[in-house]
């Protein structure tokens, strides 16, 4: 019950602070209809918790965001020399949080973001540049909300992004993948985007196998004579090349030429075998042959 009165006191002090008015205990008691001793307890409670600070003629309201920031990142000067480096890192984190706050939240970032930023450091092992890039990426997409930011962070982490150099490589791979989707879609004459499953095949060929579009195009040409586009068929063809350790477009082209010649030789051999096994009629008695003709 007292906590409710404490909150009333804090909110009224906050109101007075907004208009640069001093806090008078007697005035608080009258305005809020709260007994004088309760007012004193409330002020002591908020002062003890660092929410307000007593000055000569009253109290001032502290910045709660700064309090939270200091709680998370304030260096402990009593630590041993072994922890100096850790303290320096904490100071860097504090500066990063301040930059994020000013750059993307106009200085009014919710305290809950501090815990998220700490999570990005500890769980995902992101460096400061990656975390800054994370907020910038989401901000540019007008999606600076905790759920989306965490989802993007999880995606980057699952792709082994930890440093800004890792992030640049990831972006480059992703750009190449998007180009591959569009190019394959165009070459197959599809009037739609590739489905999620089709994109999965393309990612397998380009990322897992490391094949360029030049190599993949050899397989696409095999679909020209087919009435329907079958990605399972394409995957079997390209996976076979990967199993055969064909790594370049020249490797694939030489293999296709060799396979074509092998197929032609096999067909020629089959024709020869068929001709040699052809059974002709034999006539042992020529007299009977001619006799039959005369009759």
Image (cartoon, rainbow, N blue to C red):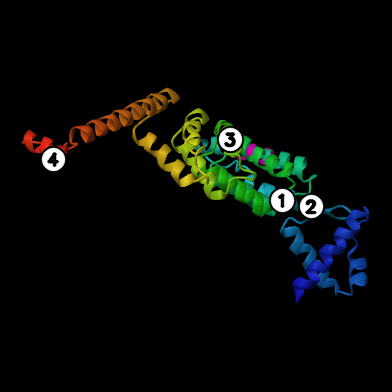
Mark 2 falls on what kind of element? loop
Query: From what the image shows, is residue 9 above or below residue 60?
Result: below
Q: Which of 78 and 179 is in front in this view?
A: 179
- Measured Cα–Cα span from mark 3 to mark 2: 63 Å
- Residue bearing mark 2: 62
- Residue bearing mark 1: 67
* Residue depth check, mark 2 versus mark 4: number of the one nearer the observer: 4
Query: From what the image shows, is residue 272 above or below residue 103?
Result: above
- Residue bearing mark 4: 292
* Residue depth check, mark 3 versus mark 2: number of the one nearer the observer: 3
Determine contact: label 3, label 4, CB under 8 Å.
no
Image: magenta residue range: 87-95
Residue shown at the point (45%, 46%) measured from the top left? 232
Name of the residue lying farthest toward the front: 295
Predominant secondary structure in magenta?
A: helix
Q: How crowded is mark 3: few (under 14 residues within 10 Å), some or many (20 or more)?
A: few
Determine contact: label 3, label 1, CB under 8 Å.
no
- Measured Cα–Cα span from mark 2 to mark 4: 128 Å
- Residue bearing mark 3: 187
């Amino acid at each position: 019950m007292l906590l409710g009165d404490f909150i009333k006191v804090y909110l009224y002090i906050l109101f007075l602070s907004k208009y640069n008015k001093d806090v008078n205990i007697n005035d608080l008691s009258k305005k809020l209809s709260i007994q004088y001793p309760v007012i004193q307890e409330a002020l002591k409670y908020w002062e003890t918790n660092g929410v307000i600070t007593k000055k000569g003629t009253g109290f001032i309201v502290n910045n709660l965001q700064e309090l939270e920031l200091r709680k998370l990142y304030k260096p402990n000067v009593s630590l041993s020399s072994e922890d100096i480096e850790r303290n320096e890192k904490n100071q860097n984190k504090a500066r990063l949080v301040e930059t994020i706050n000013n750059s993307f939240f106009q200085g009014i970032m919710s305290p809950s973001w501090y815990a998220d930023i700490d999570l990005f450091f500890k769980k995902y092992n992101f460096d400061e540049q990656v975390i800054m890039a994370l907020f910038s990426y989401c901000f540019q997409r007008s999606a600076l909300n905790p759920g989306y930011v965490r989802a993007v962070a999880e995606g980057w982490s699952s792709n082994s992004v930890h440093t800004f150099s890792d992030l640049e490589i990831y972006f480059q791979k992703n750009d190449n993948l998007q180009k591959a989707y569009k190019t394959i879609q165009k070459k197959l004459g599809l009037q739609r985007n590739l489905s999620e499953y089709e994109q999965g095949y393309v990612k397998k060929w380009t990322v897992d196998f490391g094949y360029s579009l030049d190599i993949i195009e050899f397989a696409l040409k095999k679909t020209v004579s087919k009435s329907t586009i079958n990605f399972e068929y394409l995957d079997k063809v390209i996976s076979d090349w990967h199993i055969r350790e064909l790594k370049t477009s020249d490797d694939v082209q030489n293999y296709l030429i060799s396979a074509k010649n092998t197929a032609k030789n096999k067909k020629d051999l089959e024709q020869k075998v068929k001709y040699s096994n052809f059974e002709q009629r034999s006539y042992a008695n020529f007299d009977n042959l001619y006799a039959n003709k005369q009759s």
